[in-house]
Structures are given as C-alpha cells and as structure tokens.
Amino acid sequence: MSFFSVSNLSASYGSIPVLHPLSFDLQQGCMMGVLGANGSGKTTLLKSICGILPHKGVCTLEGTVLERLSPKELAARCSYIPQRSGISIDISVLDVVLMGCNPRLKLLERPDHSMKRAAMQALSLTGLSGKEHLNYQHLSEGQKQLCILARTLVSGGQLFLMDEPESALDLHFRFAMLCLLRRQIECQKRAAIVTLHDPSLALNTCHRLLVLSEGQAAAILSPSSDSLETMEHWLSSIYGPVCLRRVRDHKGQTHLVMLKEREEE
Amino acid sequence: MKTNALCAAGTVLVLVFALASLFVGKYPLSLSELLHGNEMQLRVFLTLRVSRTLVGVLGGFALGTAGFVYQTVFGNPLASPDVIGVSSGASAGAAAGILFLSGSSAVTAASFAGALLAVICALALSSLDSSGKNSSIVLAGIAVHALAQTALMGLKLTADPERELASIEYWIMGSLNGISLSSIKGNLLICLLCLAAIFLLHRQILLLSLDEGEARMLGVCVGRLRLFVLLISTLTVSCIVSLSGLISFVGLLAPHGARLLTKDNRCSTMFLGGLIGSILLTGADLFARSAASSELPVSIFTSLLGAPFLIFLIVREGKLR
C-alpha cells in the first residue's frame, strides 16, 4: 500500500471544472513537484487535498481517508503552506512559528517549553535565528516565507502541501529551502507535494514531477531516471518548445538545465 | 517587560480612578465619616457609588476587550461589537422596556434581551451562508442593525413625547447614573464569566485572524470557534450596554491604544486594552457627574477624552518612525 494516494480527485468552481479526475500515489520520503502553466489547477489540487475546496474523489494517507477527518485530526497529519500567509496582525516571529503546534494542543492549552525549543530549532534551520522576537510584519516577503516554512516544520505533519513556498525567495534561499525540505522529508519519512514555478529548480530538487495541463495530470516524471527526450516532450506541453541538458558544475555535480527555445513568430 | 510595566501602570491608574469614582459626586463622601458609620453616607456609598464604580471599571474593561476581539477576528481596525447590531438591539429593547414595562431593572432586562436577540439573529442569518465568510457575518449584522433601528423608530413614534420619548433618548445617550447594586449582579457575573473565557481563548482568537483555509489547516474549527468567540464577546458587551445605554468610542479606541503602546497582540496587550477601556469609562463618568450641575451623558466624555488620546498616540507613532 502506498503512503499517500489520491484517487479520482476532481474539483470545480461552480459549474466550471478546474481539475479533471486525477489519481497518483506518493511513497514515503518522496517530494513531488507540481508544474503547470498559470491556471492549470496547481493551487486547486492542493486546496482540494486539504479539504479547503469541495471536491470529489478520495485522498488516503497511511490508510486514513483524509475527507473523514476533523480539522484538528487533518492538521495533525497534513501541513499546508498557502501562497501567501494571511497574517495581518502585529505578532512576533516566534509566536507565528508556535501556531504550528496548535494541532497538538488542546483548545485552552498553551505551547510548552519543548515546543518553544522545537520552534527555535526550526527558526535556526530556516536561517531566522536571532529574529524570533521581531515583528512578523517587519520581515521581508522572503523572510516571511521562511518563517511560515519553520511553522510547517514544527507542525510535525506527515504530508506537506506547499503552494509556491519559494516565490519570494532569492536564488540562494530558493535552492537552500528546497534542499532543506528534501532532507527533512527523506530523514523523517514524510512526503510533500510542492507547486513550483521554476522548472529548473523542480527538476533538480524533486524526486518526482506531476505535470498538470488544463486541470489534467499529463504525466508524472522522475527527473533522475527518465530520459531527457521524455521530459522535454512533457515540459514542452506546458511551456512550449524547450531544451533540456545535463550540465556539470565546478564541483562535478550534474544538474538539469531547461532552456526555453524561441517560438516561431 | 515593557508590556508588564504598562499593565502595572494601567492597573494603578484604574485603581486611582475607581477610588475617585467612589468618593466624587453630588453627595460628597469622606472616609472618616464612612468609618464612623454615618448612615446616610454608608447608604449612598453602598447603593449608588459601589455599583456605579463597578460598572465603570468592568464595563470599560469589557468594551475594550470585546473591541480587541472583534478587530482581531475580522481583521478590520474599525470593527466593534456594533457591527453585529448589539447596540441598536439593546436600544430597541430598552425602548420597548420603557414603553411597556415599569422599573429600571425591567428596562435593563428588556435591553439585554434586545441585544441578545440581535446577536443571535445576526449569527444565525450568517450561518445560512455555508461558505461562512467573515463578510457574511458583517452583512447579516448590518441587516439586523437596520431592522433594530426600524423597530426603535416605530417604538419612538408610539411613545408619549413628554415623558417616554425623553427617557428613551436619555437612555440611548448612555449614563452610569442610577444603576443599583441589586440590578447589576446577574449582568456582572455573566460579563466576568465571558471575559474569563475570552482570555482563556486568546491563542485561538489570534488563529482566527488568519485566512480561513490557513486557520483550518492549523487545526482550527473556524466556523464554530468564530461563532462562539463572537457570541461571548458580544454577550459581555450586551451585559454592560443594557445597564448603561450606549457608550461610544471605548470599544474602538481602547484596543488601538493598547496596540500602539505595545506593538503586538499578546494576551497582555488585550488586558491592557481592557485597562485603557476602564480608565476611559471611569474617567468619563467622573466628568459626567461633576462637570455641570446636572448629570451629563457619559458618551460625550468618552469621545472628548478618547479622540485626543488616539490622535496623541498616532502622532507619537509618526515621530518614532
């Protein structure tokens, strides 16, 4: 039995279908990137799995049907990062991270010392140590995303659902964040579904890639084993003509690079 | 640390104002006479001053705390319990009480029932919208507010202009005058219980300020929790407003004052907001009973004291940046 499986998931806004029935499985320790053009249904897919959007079909995590869980039980298993966090009040960075402990706390309980330690640890992992007492609103957009990532790490869910968690980060942090995420998922036997806009980043950091095209799952790619031609074919279906190359850096590590080819006028 | 110091200073100020409120008024009291058992002094002290001070301190605290909750849950700096129509419901209830019942405690009970009815209507109407957005609660509140205003207008039309209309108008202006100890016990008890619940739920109230989906994925039953939090914070306000009549500006201003001073939304800031509310309301009440030869509406002074205070804080904030 697979760790996480989605079967016949579909969703629509009113009468307009946004996500056509799609199914896939995810193994433990696997990070799956979701690539697709704007409006292809990436966010809808994540929100449907979370149960934030009404949908048809079933999602199963370790044998538990997610649709049957209460918000609290669901939150203890799945952690979700929205494209933009809706924190609008003045609140310290540490308190934001501690919000991630809520699924494990009773209604009136407060976070204890071990949770505070875990929060500080998560902040240092995401490069925000020393900033725990700053006002969240005074952080840059990129630092806000790192802070929300720390909150997700604290929440201890088995499945991470992340909607463009790196959109406001610079090149260094973008790569560092996804590598950190991948390490965490591999070491702690979790799984993640991450929507991404940058195909090169996705090709080099994700174990698998779900290609979404107009609400349909066009293909699931494995960047480490699939041939360049196969991947080129499917990526072209999203981005138009592209060219994939394996390139070595100064340290001898191999990277996949995607170049956009000029289209005929 | 700074917040703790502010809270301590606020508590001291509240105590000073409460002491002043016990002894200042038309009938001057002195501690030595009270201790010697002057009967007239004791009676004024126990039947008038104690209840008035209690309502001033606790009422201000409740308005400030409820304002904090509303502004946080709706993510709107202008939100206050009035958006759910609690004040207009209380006014309509009080007007009905003045017209059809007799006695001040009956009017209090009627206005409390009016406020509660308005809140329950607004929350029930909003729950018809299954998407459960914040905006649907606000819209339902506006509808209930309009209906309550219409009911109030109808009641005013049937009122005798000499006597009843005047007392309806005077009730709406708000005053802590003539509140007797016997009629406030129930209200104060409910108010205290709700306040305790609000402080216990502070962490959840902050979670409600997030977007709905985000809060849900942090394990919050958004719909139910929001209904409960709004219900108890509106209940605290109903308890006070049904005793005092409308009190403007405290619920809006006190939490902003606290936040401008501490720059966060911790539990201590909510407490500080309550203290500022207490100071404002007791201070305003002291002016209301001593500024002129006759008793003045307390709302005049909450606004007169509050508006400059808010402007001072904003100007100070601008200079600090």
Image (cartoon, coloured by chain):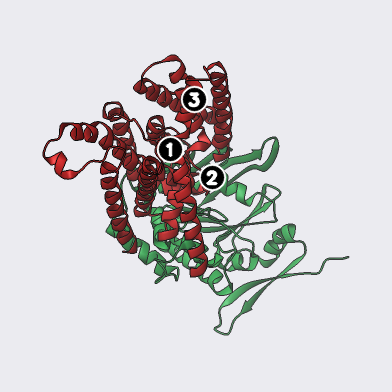
Chain corresponding to red in the figure? B
Residue placed under numbered mark 3 in the picture: B166
Which element carries disc 3, helix, strand or loop?
Answer: helix
Residue A125 to residue B69: above or below: below
- Residue A101 at x, y percent in the picture: 37, 53
Residue placed under numbered mark 2 in the picture: A49
Q: Amino acid at mark 2?
A: Ile
Q: Residues within 10 Å of mark 2 (few under 14, many from 20)?
A: many
Residue drawn at the location 30% of the way across and 40% of the way down: B53
Which element carries disc 1, helix, strand or loop?
Answer: loop
Q: Amino acid at mark 3?
A: Ala
Closer to the chain start, of discs 1 and 3, is 3
Chain corresponding to green in the figure? A
Image mark 1: chain: B
Viewed as shown, does residue B19 lie left or right of B132? left
> Which residue is nearer to you in this view: B99 or A14?
B99
Q: Residues within 10 Å of mark 3 (few under 14, many from 20)?
A: some
Disc 1 or disc 2, which is closer to the eye? 1
- Residue B198 at x, y percent in the picture: 36, 42
